[in-house]
Structure formats: C-alpha cells, structure tokens
Amino acid sequence: MSKIRMTTPLVEMDGDEMTRIIWRQIKTICLEPFVDLKTEYFDLGLKHRDETEDKVTLDAARRSRELGVAVKCATITPNAQRVEEYQLKKMWKSPNATIRAYLDGTVFRAPIMVSCIRPQVSAWQKPITIARHAYGDIYSASELLVDGPCRAELVLTAPDGSEKRQLVHDFAGPGVLMGMHNLDDSIASFARSCMTFALDSHQDLWFAAKDTISKTYDHRFKDIFAEIYAQEFAADFAAAGIAYFYTLIDDAVARIMRSEGGLIWACKNYDGDVMSDMLAAANGSLAMMTSVLVAPHGTTEYEAAHGTVTRHYYRHLKGEKTSTNPMATLFAWTGALKRRAELDGLTDLSAFADKLEKAALATIEAGIVTGDLKSLAQLDQVKVVDTEAFLQAVASRLD
Ligand code: NAP
Ligand code: MG
C-alpha cells in the first residue's frame, strides 16, 4: 500500500510524561503506517526546554507562524517541585503561555461526542465550542484590602502628567477594591479569531457579556465585536449561511441549556474559564475534549485539553501498562492534518484524518474503552484496554 503524501510540513511539538509516551504510540500505530508524515520536530520536553534555556518553545512558536499549522503534546508547567525533580536552571514559563503570547490567539475547546456517552444536558446533540479570550480582566487585576474609611478613585495619568479622576467609592468602613483592564487590540484579535473559526467550522457564533451593567467596559467588547463583524465578516457570514449575534451573558446561559449545540460561544476570560469547565464536566472527561489555539493571522495550533497525566506516568515507570485515554491527543493530530490538508489542497490526507476520527469514535461505541470511560459509557458490555491496545483497535478499523 502506498502512503498518503504531504507537501508542506507541520510543526510537531513533543511534550512530557504520559502524553509523550502516547504521542509516540499514536505516530507508530495510527499515523506512520498510512501517511508519509512531514513534520518539523521541536522537543518541548522539560529537559530539552531547560537545555535550550526555553529557546525551543519560542522557536517552535515562530516556525508555527511561518508554516501555519502546529500540533502540540501536553507539557509540564514547572513549579517548585518540578524545578527540584528535573534539576532545572530556572522555573521556566508555561509553554502554552509563551506560545499564546507570541501567536496572540484565542483558545477553542469542544467535546468529542460519542453516542454511548450522553451529555448531562439532554438537549445537546452537537458539540458546543467555547472560545475563551485569554487576556486581561480579573486574571491581571490589581486588588486591595480596604481596612477603614477612605476614598477610592480611578486615576489616569497621561505622559504629560495630566490626570483624570473618577470616584469608585467613599468607604465608611473596611472592604475590598479591584482595578482591571483590557486592550482594544486584544479584544479585536479575539473577535477576529472567533469569526474566522466560525467561518472555517461553519457554525454560528454567539458572544455574550454584561453591557447593561458594565456600560463602558463590557460595552467596549460588544462594540468592537460589532465593528469588526460589520467591516470584515458580515458578507462572508451571509454567504456561508451562518449567523453572529450578541446577547447578555445570563440570556446566553439560559439559551445554551435549551440549544441543540453545534455553535461557538465566545466568552470573556472569566466566563470562558467557568463555562469551559462546566462544558467538560457536562460531557464527562477532559480526555474527550479538543483544544485549538487560533491566531488572528490564521495560524492554528492543536493540542489536548488535559495535562501530562503524571499519576499514570509514574505507574508506567514502574513497568505497569496504563489505560490512559489518547483521544484528545489523537484528535489534536487529526485536526492538524486536516488543516494542513485544507491549506495544501490534499483531499487524500483530509479523508484519512476523517476516517481516523471515525475509527476512534467507532472503537469506543463498540465498547472498547480506556479506564476513564468505563463508568461513563452507557453500553451493555465494555472492555477496558490499555492505551496501546486501544490504538491498535482503532488502527485495525482503518485497514
Ligand atoms: P492532568 O494531566 O490533566 O491529569 C489529572 C487527572 O485527570 C489524571 O490524574 C487522570 O485521573 C485524569 N486524566 C487526565 N487526562 C487523562 C487521560 N488522557 N486519560 C485518562 N485520565 C486522564 O492534570 P495534572 O495532573 O493536574 O497535571 C499534570 C501535569 O500536566 C502538570 O505538570 C501540569 O503542569 C501539566 N499540564 C499541562 C497542560 C498542557 O500542556 N496543556 C495542561 C494542564 C496541565 P486519574 O489519575 O484519576 O486516572
Ligand atoms: Mg478553570
């Protein structure tokens, strides 16, 4: 059998621990026998990040922007314990934060749905994608404890020293205070990423905030979305037969519970944090979620929504076979291959990635699952297998 050809390489970012093992298994069992894989390999494993003073992460991000498509394995974000465990030179930044800061993107997360795992919300028939703005608001706020009577004001100081003041509150007693911000540029690139993703995935786009209460701050988000939509996207949306609308966040929550899904829900930073965890919980497992970073200039980076599954890795190191779910990592690969295929006009490659996804879903629906899905899958018989056996069952459906 001749292998499916690729023309342009994609950026491959290897990672850590259990997901690094799964990465290799996916390539060996499900990809390399069928596709003549073309990738530019960057080792983002913690050891190599340390050796390169984390230069490898930025190199990978730069190259992703040039090639347009990347796939990333989960990586360790070092903390004090990891610094000791790996004898690191420094507590390096989260690779995801470095890549996001360079590519300036929005993160889209959606559940991988199978017929035998029903979402807790019975109306949901199709996946709901959360698009989370990943800049500003309470995540970079400045907060103060107020310990007694005082006047709190917002003060803007211009470069020429002139000041603008606005009263926040005259405190008569103790309380709390917070100052937060966002940037027009960041909000605009968030809007563009969401609208581009809606067009690419052919789904409606909802955006919700609280502009009735936050008449300046949230209203600015609403206005920027409206301007960008009218100036850059309205015609394309109409041609594609998809819709964009803005609504209040509480209205969006009520509507989402009654909707059948198949839409993108753009959320401000905090709303996205909360709602994506709600979505993951309602759909069962983080290992059944896809995650993709879309930059405003079109670069897309696919990854799993979960971490490096450390607890399973320690069992693997003791020689045990683990039943770690490879679905999210597998779908990161198929997502990246499909995007590459789309950009390069490779119908064989795109059809292969579709078949691989269908084979993986069919394997679970046939009752062959990893341990995490054992109690979730509503089937008469489920057979729990280790990761390798699961991937082999998927590949056997491709022959
Ligand atoms: P985690 O790796 O997502 O795992 C937490 C737990 O969730 C696991 O112990 C496991 O539960 C379950 N789980 C997650 N993925 C699974 C899968 N594919 N199959 C089966 N079960 C799965 O989160 P963590 O333990 O908090 O973090 C571990 C490391 O990952 C940390 O160093 C962190 O920095 C890193 N991390 C990286 C990313 C990223 O690169 N995107 C994201 C988050 C965390 P059981 O043990 O109960 O089976
Ligand atoms: Mg959260």
Image: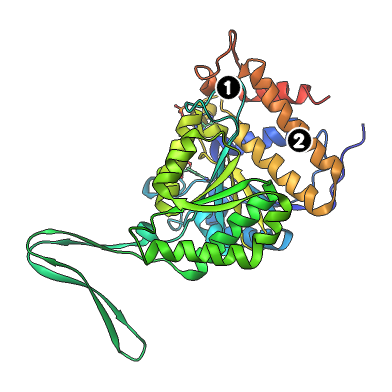
| Mark found first going from the N terminus, 2 or 1 | 2
Give 174 or 241, whichever is nearer the viewer: 241
Bin the neighbour count of mark 2 within 10 Å (Cα to Cα): few under 14, some 14-19, many 20 and up.
some
Residue labelled with disc 2: 354
Report if the beta carbon of the residue with label 2 is closer than 8 angstroms to ligand 1: no
Residue drawn at x 54%, y 38% as measured from the top left: 17
x, y (%) of residue 348?
Answer: 86, 40
216, above or below 76, in the image:
below
Q: Nearer the viewer, residue 307 or 132?
A: 132
Q: Secondary structure at mark 1?
A: loop
Q: Single out the mark in the foreground, 2 or 1.
A: 2
The quarter of the picture where the C terminus appears is top right
Residue 207 x/y as whole percent: 50, 52
Q: In the image, what residue occupies the spot 70% across and 22% down?
A: 362
Q: Which mark is residue 370?
A: 1
Amino acid beneath label 1: Thr
Residue plotted at (84% across, 48% down) = 6
Name the foreground residue: 79 vs 189. 189
Report if the beta carbon of the residue with label 1 is closer than 8 angstroms to ligand 1: yes
- Percent position (x, y) of residue 359? 73, 26
For the residues marked 2 and 1, what is the alpha-carbon distance in whole angstroms?
Answer: 21 Å
